[in-house]
């Protein structure tokens, strides 16, 4: 399952503080939150294919802008070395006032069987 593969790539970057969909209430930054945005099932003339394309959003949170940028770079490097085919689509910077953390949001297209 792609979520398990993603967790195995991301968790070592933040000492296990990598969460699907929502971070723990007591999460200590830096941490990562990832979620599946959409998963497209591919069909061909013979019917459904085992090939699946999943778009995921990976958000890194840190106390400083520089820390968020460094963590985003580490995620990019880890994804390039990941055992599954993926392509980074975009990244964007944010500041989350509610939690007073910097966030970099990275979007990926992941291909898997």
Image (cartoon, rainbow, N blue to C red):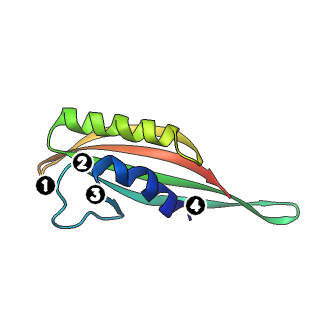
Percent coordinates x, y for residue 20 in the rendering: 37, 64
Residue in the image at 51% along x and 58% along y: 5
Q: Is residue 102 left or right of residue 83?
A: left
**Dot 4 or dot 1, earlier in sequence:** 4
Percent coordinates x, y for residue 48 in the rendering: 78, 66
Is label 3 in contact with label 2 (beta carbons under 8 Å)? no
**Dot 2 or dot 4, earlier in sequence:** 4
Question: Any mark on residue 17, and which?
Answer: 3
Percent coordinates x, y for residue 65 in the rendering: 19, 35
Q: Residues within 10 Å of mark 1 (few under 14, many from 20)?
A: few
Residue in the image at 31% along x and 57% along y: 16
Q: CA distance from mark 4 to mark 3?
A: 24 Å
Q: What residue is disc 4 on?
A: 39
Q: CA distance from mark 4 to mark 1?
A: 30 Å
Q: Quadrant of residue 34?
A: bottom left
Q: Nearer the viewer, mark 3 or mark 1?
A: 3
Secondary structure at numbered mark 3: loop
Q: Residues within 10 Å of mark 2 (few under 14, many from 20)?
A: many
């Amino acid at each position: 399952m792609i979520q398990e593969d993603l967790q195995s790539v991301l968790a070592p970057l933040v000492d296990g503080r990598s969460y699907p969909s929502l971070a723990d209430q007591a999460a200590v930054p830096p941490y990562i939150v990832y979620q599946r945005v959409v998963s497209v099932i591919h069909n061909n003339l013979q019917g459904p294919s085992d090939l699946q394309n999943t778009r995921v959003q990976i958000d890194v949170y840190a106390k400083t802008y520089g820390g968020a940028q460094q963590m985003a770079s580490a995620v990019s490097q880890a994804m390039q070395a990941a055992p599954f085919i993926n392509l980074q689509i975009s990244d964007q910077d944010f500041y989350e006032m509610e939690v007073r953390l910097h966030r970099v949001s990275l979007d990926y297209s992941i291909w898997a069987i």
